[in-house]
Amino acid sequence: MRNRTESMDNVKSPVSVHNSINSPIYSFVSSSRSVKRPRPVKSCLECRKRKLRCDRVSPCSQCQKAQRSCRYAAEGDAVSVSDGSDVETHERAAKRIRTVTSQESGQSSTNYSTVLEEHAARLERLERQLLTRTSSVAESSNATTQRPAAPSVTIRGLTVKGGLRTRFFGQSSTRVLVNLFGEARDFMFSRNKSNDIKEMFMNIQKIHKALQDEHRKATAPITVFVDSMTPIQKRMADVLPSRTVCDTLLGIYLSGSETIYRVLHIPSFMGQYNGYWEGKAQSDAFLPQLLSILCVGYRYIGAGKGQYHDREGIHIPTASALVRTWLDGLRGKQLVEFSTLQAELLQLMAQRMINPQNQETWTHIGLIVRMAMTMGLHRDPSEFAQKISPYWAEQRRKLWYTILELDVHMSMQCNLPCCIREGDFTCLPPRNLNDDDIHPTIEQLPPSKPIDQNTDSRIQVFAASTLSMRFKVVDLINRTDSLQDYQQVLELGNELERVFEDARYIIPPSHPKDSKELRRLWVTRVVLDMHCRRPLLALYRPFALSSPDAPQQIVTGYLRSSMILLSYLDELDPTSPDYLHIWHMHHLVLKQEILQAAFSICYYLKQATSNPEPSGSTNSNPNDKLEATEESCTVASESSILLSQPRLVATVEKTIDAFLQRIKEIGTDLRDIVSLTVVFHTSQGGTSEQKRAAIKKGIQAIVDVGMQATHASQESMSSLPVRDPLLSHVFSTCLADLSTTDDAVANVGADQYDAGERGFHAALCDA
């Protein structure tokens, strides 16, 4: 055994064998070996234990992020390390000493069989260690107290119609959020409503049908332009409004959208724009880009703009359809033109003005991602420096990071994976420069300006610095079932929270007297805040509203972020001339986030005011779990004045009023308003009669506003047709579809489903 041990000491490590230029056999039996000195311990104990890269300062950045105590081994202290550490163990040191001794005495003798036996023994020891570690991981995964437990019915859903038509819904969908409120869901789905409640639901059905018909007409393009045989460039020029109107809409787009989603080089585009009105010929892509820009600008002006043909604006459905026709007609080399990619992105933004369907946008952005990658935008232009000028290199970076922003945003909205993953691209972020600082003939880009200095690209540059964290959020919320504990969620949440501090440093609170400057600063602060507020809400949402054992940091952080999102407009003066314009943009851009935040606040109100309800719980001790959830929600609501219960109630009431004011707007769904109203009034506590009276009052308010929006009287409402008058529970059937999941739909009988399809289920619930 001594000989075997001594011979083993003479062999090289597997790494050295692998890297040797000689035959592996001869390297095994080499009689001489270079003895390496042990490397000193430099990393902290926590980084070494977790196999993390340590920057070797005290405390190190890794420990600061995870809020761990950072400790270093004292010189001369024994340290327990793994085989892969940067320190030589006592056993290795002893072997090395014996090896040197045996070499000096000349008694080393090895053979192939001995070497192979020793390596087999090494592999056996390594296998035992791996099996031990694997078993310990498996044991920790079985610990229900540490593993996040969020019922799938509260974070995702699937509708199935006819057995073949299916659609997935993520955690921010109303269909999924309703599942968090058992009492409200039971009320909406019950067929035993009183006659007065049934009549209200019947009227809401009629109002919804009238609004849907109006929206369908408003979003239809004008056929005389779309179906004409006239050349497409001529048709696009025919729908263009006057120069004065175009100037206004272009200015609104540049100040409202060309801040985070950088598509244009503003001086170059303005040169083309002015040349077009002077009668100079422009490229074929100019008119499609301009029409899409005007569509976005006109939709930002105010409610209802762009839905009807008028001389003071542009008809968005017609203009968007013409641009789509032009894009679909491109072939060959035209498809890899930089201007074509710009037009694709702008047309996507314009289409979302009249068709805000997140899943359709997510599908479309996937095509744009692949189009950009075939053009090489995912690789940094410096890799092709001899072919791409500095000016075009910077434009490619801006456009690529705009695509990344849209991909991350839509993936988060749909609760679906990103088309691009971190590591799939090498393109560097753009520099913090004004567009006037660079031009097509520039030979070298100027240095980037400090981030606290306002430029045309500052918001995009700041957002790009947080892109890595947001990629991690999208990845994490799509694999919540595989999480073993809350460690990753808490660490990522802490990183995002620190970004808010950076944003406040970049744009400190101020109150300039100039209204335009005040509006610009407010928009900048909101955009910077939302780029990390969205992912933080998406990160905390599966656990704050579903997991009974979620850490208090997640519960309180989620409620605080929801309230901050709903309080953005509180900074502005409602009497200012441009308040209505900002209010409209706020609800247009953040509609889905506002709706989710309102439902979330209702969840906190329900937990803080209601008694434990074991129904729907899958835990062995449901009452204990629900009591823990209620305690967490109560602590969260008492943590600050912003989160006090009266403030929460007033905020949700204000949100419902805002949705009612926008009841005619494209994208406003009457089902969302009804669901939020019922959920809100069942979440405030009280007796069953008190809740029923409050719900009745809220539903009646929806009916009154809907009648005004459709210009209907009580007499005309009674004469409006119903799809199936036999279905007295029509609206309940529709609302039931809001919470339909794969399990629920599988249990729906064919007869019941067919009846629902013939009734209001078909009228309202087709998504």
Image (cartoon, grey):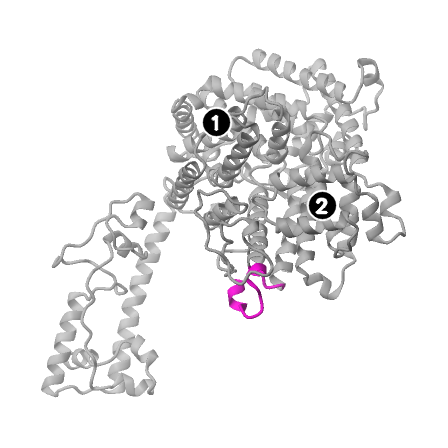
- Residue 88's x, y, as percent? 19, 66
**Residue 269 spot, x, y in % from top left:** 67, 50
Residue placed most toward the observer, 586 or 476: 586
Q: Quadrant of the N terminus?
A: bottom left
Question: In the image, which residues are magenta?
Answer: 375-393
Q: Secondary structure at mark 1?
A: loop
Q: Is residue 406 magenta?
A: no
User: What's the residue type where badge 1 is placed?
Assistant: His
* Front tag of 2 and 1: 1
Q: Label 2 crowding class (10 Å Cα cut-off): few <14, some 14-19, many 20+?
A: many
Q: Position of residue 245 (x, y in %)?
A: 74, 37
As rendered, which of 542 and 221 lies closer to the eye?
A: 221
Q: Residue at x 16, y 75 (%)?
A: 96
Q: Which residue is mark 2?
A: 292
Residue 684 relative to residue 554: left or right: right
Give the x, y percent position of residue 559: 46, 29
Depth order, front residue of 719/638: 638
Q: Which residue is mark 1?
A: 511
Amino acid on which disc 2 is placed:
Ser
Q: Residue at x 87, y 43 (%)?
A: 223
| SS of the residue under disc 2 | helix
Give the answer, above or below, for where 35 lies relative to 715. below
Question: How many angstroms separate mark 2 from mark 1 (CA)?
Answer: 34 Å
Q: Does 540 sit above or below residue 130?
A: above
